[in-house]
Image (cartoon, rainbow, N blue to C red):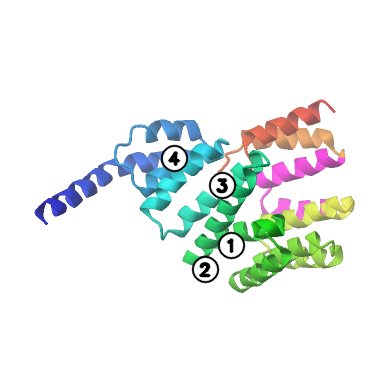
Amino acid sequence: MHRLMLWVALAASAAAAEAPLLERARELYNRTEYDAALKILASVAYKDSAFYLLRGQCYYMQGDARKASELFLKAVELEPANSDRRMWLGRAYGRRAETSSFFTAPGYATKARDNFEKAVQLNPRNMEAISDLFEYYMDAPGFLGGGLDKAAALARRIGELNPAEGHWAQARLAEKRKEYQKAEQQFRSAADLAPRQIGRVIDLAKFLAKAGRYQESEEAFRRAERIDPNAPKLLFERASIYIRTGRNLELARQLLKRYLEASLTPDDPPRERAEKLLKSASSS
């Protein structure tokens, strides 16, 4: 017993001593400085679940899903009842399914679904995990556990937790079913219920542009601009729509240059995507 207590005390002391390093690495991660975060993490000796999660997140954001999944698996092994750990492991397996061969993709997809479902089971209010599972059900074929009926049930649960997000989920579902009028109504309801959430307004703008209703799409983008004219997501998505539809290419280039100069977070599209879009706009 004495030895056990001594070991626990030493482990706690080591964790406390290295907490500032983890916090610094997390700050760098939140600024999308993944290489710098990984350099700091390389000097951490005490490796707990939080360490493996953060290191895995860095590799995931850099596009190395294999390395990320290995690290997330270690985080899950140390904290099997942690919903977020399961969610990130599901994301890594999902990315591996998207980039692997025809023969190995189904196995990774199944692992992704299993971990998303476990994450939701562990924390039924984890909105990120629920949204990930919703997207999986929307996109995966039935033989891999997907299906619109499952997605519809989850959309209702999302609505119970967050009405605006629930309308967004119903909009995505209606769009998938080619019920475009219903989808528009749901996108508008989501934006109206969350008037300060710029993402919901951008969703409406993108939907209208996809339907070729460019003037209405512009009105929605201007509405988003009034919320936050410098929001990185607004800059990127607006430029992306312009390039995709072959309109306002000079403005698209300006928006992407502003995006590349902005302070980004892991929730924003990677700089590499913006650079690729800028290159395509410049060659048009």
The alpha-carbon separation of the residues under discs 2 and 4 comes to: 26 Å
Q: Decide if residue 24 is on the left or right side of residue 102.
A: left
Disc 2 secondary structure class: loop
Percent of width and height locating residue 30? 50, 43
Q: Is residue 192 visible?
A: no
| Mark 1 crowdedness (10 Å alpha carbons): few <14, some 14-19, many ≥20 | many
Residue that mark 2 sits on: 124
Q: Which callout, 3 or 4, points at the residue further toward the start of the chain? A: 4
> Quadrant of the image for the C terminus?
top right
Q: Amino acid at mark 4?
A: Arg
Label 1 sits on a secondary structure element that is: helix
**In terms of depth relative to the viewer, which is nearer, 137 or 208?**
137
Residue bearing the label numbered 4: 55
Q: Position of residue 136 (x, y in %)?
A: 65, 56
Mark 1 = which residue? 130
Say few, some or many: other residues with alpha carbon within 10 Å of mark 2 (under 14 / 14 to 19 / 20 or more).
some
**Closer to the observer: label 1 or label 3?**
3
Q: Is residue 13 magenta?
A: no
